[in-house]
Image: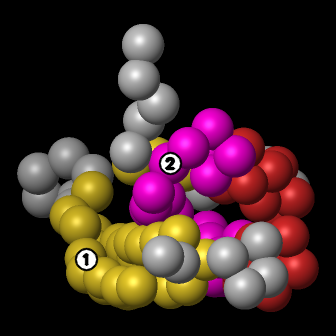
């Protein structure tokens, strides 16, 4: 079985270090890039996850290659609301 080339970490309500650990593990298993995804109030935790991973755990080994932002409609029809989303793409340096 070949190693995954790309990983995804979905950020939610758990402590930030859980997501940092998940990101580092994916890189250690051979992923070339990891996408950190979050929405709503978890966006700041996703940014923290990317920065802690990049500056402390894998310093000099990974870079932020792309940041995508957007909105999603959530809720039932008539009661929908918009929720902000972010995707931070960390890529291993060549």
Looking at the image, the residue that sits furthest to the left is: 77
* Closer to us: 40 or 62: 62
Q: Which residue is tagged 2? A: 31
Quadrant of residue 46 in the image? bottom right
Q: Closer to the observer: label 1 or label 2?
A: 2
Question: Label 2 crowding class (10 Å Cα cut-off): few <14, some 14-19, many 20+?
Answer: some
Task: Evaluate whether residue 48 shows in this view.
Answer: no
Using the numbered discs, state the Cα–Cα distance from disc 1 to disc 2 in whole angstroms: 27 Å
Q: Which residue is tagged 1? A: 71
Quadrant of residue 43 in the image? bottom right
Residue at horizontal 80%, vertical 51%? Answer: 21
Residue at horizontal 69%, vertical 46%? Answer: 28
Question: What residue range appears in magenta?
Answer: 26-50
Residue at horizontal 67%, vertical 76%? Answer: 61
Q: Position of residue 4 (x, y in %)?
A: 42, 35
Residue at horizontal 23%, vertical 67%? Answer: 72
């Amino acid at each position: 079985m070949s190693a995954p080339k790309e990983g995804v970490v979905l950020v939610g309500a758990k402590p930030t270090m859980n997501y940092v650990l998940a990101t580092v593990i994916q890189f250690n298993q051979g992923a070339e890039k990891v996408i950190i995804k979050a929405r709503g109030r978890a966006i700041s935790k996703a940014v923290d996850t990317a920065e802690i991973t990049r500056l402390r755990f894998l310093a000099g080994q990974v870079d932020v290659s792309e940041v995508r932002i957007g909105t999603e409609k959530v809720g039932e029809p008539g009661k929908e609301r918009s929720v902000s989303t972010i995707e931070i793409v960390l890529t291993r340096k060549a």
